[in-house]
Image (cartoon, helix red, strand yellow):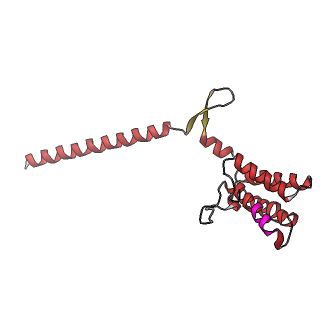
Amino acid sequence: MENNKKKKEISEKEKLEKEKKQEEEREMILMQADENNEEALIFSDSDDTLVIKNEIADMFLAEIDDPKKKYDMYYNAISNVLRRHLPKGDKFKKSRDWIYEEKNTFLTGKRKDKYGKRHADGRQSYSPVMAELVDIISGWISSKGTPVELYVTLRDKNIEKGYGKPEQE
């Protein structure tokens, strides 16, 4: 009986030691995870210097998209303005469609695939991208530009950003 008691004590002791080791291992892993504070090394193009950038801090400092502002920009400052200033009628439908395609490519960064699907929605674009498009459109209107000028401007911006050439070219 005493022998069983000793075995039980030893097994409990071993169990406690094993649990203690596991707990220490967990703490070590958590401490290592705590050491990684989302810093990244970034090379600065301007002067070839190395910069440590805290990505989490940048996320908090970055502008947070405001749904109402995005709605106003997309529907009031982009879509409605284009509808008002582009030529109307069936005769100009193809040219309007080309401009709308460039607008949507600009906002999403994606061209339509071979099945005619873009797999992105311009209404969900980032606010700065929408603001850039609003600037382009307002510059086009203030200079009394033609639809061709707007198309060429948007197409060239899309090519410059690496989104590729439109299908019709």
6 vs 94, left or right, is left
Identified at 83% across, 51% down, the residue is 135
Nearer to us in this view, 86 or 26: 86
Where's residue 22, x and y in %?
32, 43
72 vs 19, left or right, is right
Where's residue 10, x and y in %?
17, 43
Pick out the residue farthest to the bottom: 90
Nearer to us in this view, 127 or 153: 153
Nearer to us in this view, 124 or 144: 144
Vertically, is 118 above or below 34?
Answer: below
Quarter of the figure with the C terminus: bottom right
Q: How many marks?
A: 0
The chief SS type of the magenta part is helix
Magenta run includes residue 93: yes
Nearer to us in this view, 124 or 9: 124
Identified at 68% across, 53% down, the residue is 165
Magenta run includes residue 18: no
Identified at 82% across, 73% down, the residue is 90
Identified at 85% across, 63% down, the residue is 81
Name the image quarter holding residue 56: top right
Residue 41 in view here? yes
Vertically, is 145 above or below 27?
Answer: below
Vertically, is 118 above or below 12?
Answer: below
148 vs 6, left or right, is right
Vertically, is 30 above or below 92?
Answer: above
Where's residue 25, x and y in %?
35, 40
Where's residue 52, x and y in %?
60, 32
Residue 128 in view here? no
Pick out the residue farthest to the front: 169
Q: Which residues are magenta?
A: 92-98
